[in-house]
């Protein structure tokens, strides 16, 4: 009997100890997959790689290198910018997707994943990534040379309509923003003659020299030429004008039928591979949000006359890329510039 009582006492002590251990778990490394909020995980505990799928010194790279140290400040770990250029951003995007879904690889993307599939440059799309933050876009401006006969956007439109296929525009290359903007003109019944020049700068020089009649330029790229008088801005490619060019009307004023497609941004954004834990994404979003509130970032955006898009939620970003992918993929396919039909990838035609 005494032995039974003693045994029962020992079992009681063991059970109490097990319950106590269950209430107070031993602290240890967290993988980011545990239940609970973001404050309970050990992330980040090593450096973050920020993948820029474009060459060093380009527009996207310059923006990323201003953002990176501010992002680093609020993450508490070093952020290394890695350039993986080629194939209109597809090489760097494929590289980022090949890394683990752990938040330690962040893609500093432009808009091109929206057309990868139809253009045949990659099997990936925005659907393969989760959005963290939309950042900025460099406003597009329709410009002509200082010696152009066009003094207003309306005059340019009227001439295109009167001489279909005769008015010439330059753009950098197939699938790039200028190409898509020219195709949108054609979709709206403006038959322009489009010539690729292999890059934004050569396309702009062709306009300055009078080799072509007009081009679509990033304001950050063309503003110096506008200020010295080599280029004349005719319209802003958007629903609204911009502060640095108060006398230049938005395109929709003279071309109201374009409103259903606008705004059509070509922005930079932060993405992580699909499957990244929600808690990790919360930490990255919080750090990015704080970085974009830094005075240094705000001054940079203002000095370059960029449009800030950081108020968009992840859900709104997904909706925007769906719209962008639908519009641009079908424009490229209908023009014969894409290798594959958007239907192959379940991309519906934009509902006009």
Image (tube, rainbow, N blue to C red):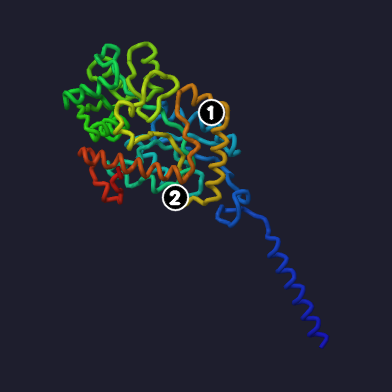
Label 1: few (<14), some or many (≥20) within 10 Å? Answer: some
Along the line of sight, the residue nearer the viewer: 87 or 285:
285
Residue at label 2?
274
How many labels, in total? 2
Of callouts 2 and 1, the N-terminal one: 2
Which residue sits at x=20%, y=21%?
Answer: 159
The CA distance from mark 2 to mark 1 is: 28 Å
Q: Residue extending furthest bottom? A: 1
Residue 47: name its quadrant. top right
- Residue 240 percent location from the top left of the image: 40, 28
Judging from the image, what secondary structure is the residue with disc 2 in?
loop
Q: On residue 260, which mark appears?
A: none
Q: Can residue 202 be seen in this view?
A: no
Along the line of sight, the residue nearer the viewer: 102 or 290:
290
Q: What quarter of the picture does the N terminus occupy? A: bottom right
Judging from the image, what secondary structure is the residue with disc 1 in?
helix
Residue 237: name its quadrant. top left
Q: In this view, does 257 lie to the left or right of 94?
A: left
Label 2: few (<14), some or many (≥20) within 10 Å? Answer: some
Q: Can residue 162 be seen in this view?
A: yes
Which residue sits at x=73%, y=66%?
Answer: 20
- Residue 53 percent location from the top left of the image: 40, 36
Which residue sits at x=53%, y=24%?
Answer: 299
Q: Of tags 2 and 1, which is closer to the observer?
A: 1
The vertical placement of 221 against 183, above or below, is above
Q: What quarter of the picture does the C terminus occupy? A: top left
Residue 78: name its quadrant. top right
Residue at label 1?
297
């Amino acid at each position: 009997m005494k032995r039974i009582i003693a045994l029962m006492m020992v079992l009681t002590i063991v059970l109490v100890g097990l319950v106590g251990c269950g209430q107070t778990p031993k602290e240890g490394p967290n993988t980011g997959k545990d239940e609970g909020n973001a404050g309970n995980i050990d992330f980040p505990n090593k450096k973050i790689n920020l993948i820029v799928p474009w060459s060093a010194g380009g527009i996207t790279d310059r923006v990323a290198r201003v953002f990176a140290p501010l992002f680093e400040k609020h993450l508490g770990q070093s952020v290394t910018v890695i350039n993986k250029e080629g194939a209109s951003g597809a090489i760097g995007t494929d590289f980022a997707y090949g890394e683990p879904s752990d938040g330690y690889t962040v893609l500093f993307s432009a808009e091109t994943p929206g057309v990868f599939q139809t253009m045949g440059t990659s099997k990936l799309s925005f659907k393969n990534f989760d959005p963290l933050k939309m950042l900025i876009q460099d406003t597009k401006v329709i410009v002509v040379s200082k010696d152009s006969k066009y003094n207003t956007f309306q005059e340019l439109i009227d001439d295109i309509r009167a001489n279909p296929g005769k008015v010439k525009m330059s753009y950098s290359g197939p699938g790039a923003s200028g190409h898509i903007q020219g195709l949108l003109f054609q979709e709206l019944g403006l038959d322009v003659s489009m010539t690729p020049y292999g890059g934004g700068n050569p396309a702009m020089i062709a306009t300055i020299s009078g080799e072509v009649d007009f081009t679509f330029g990033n304001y950050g790229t063309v503003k110096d030429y506008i200020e010295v008088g080599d280029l004349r801005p005719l319209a802003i490619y958007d629903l609204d004008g911009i502060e640095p060019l108060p006398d230049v009307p938005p395109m929709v004023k003279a071309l109201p039928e374009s409103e259903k497609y606008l705004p059509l941004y070509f922005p930079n954004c932060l993405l992580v591979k699909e499957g990244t834990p929600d808690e990790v994404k919360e930490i990255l979003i919080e750090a990015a949000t704080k970085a974009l509130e830094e005075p240094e970032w705000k001054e940079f955006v203002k000095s370059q006359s960029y449009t800030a898009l950081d108020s968009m939620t992840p859900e709104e970003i997904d909706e925007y890329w769906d719209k962008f992918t639908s519009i641009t993929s079908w424009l490229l396919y209908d023009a014969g510039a894409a290798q594959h039909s958007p239907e192959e990838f379940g991309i519906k035609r934009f509902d006009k």
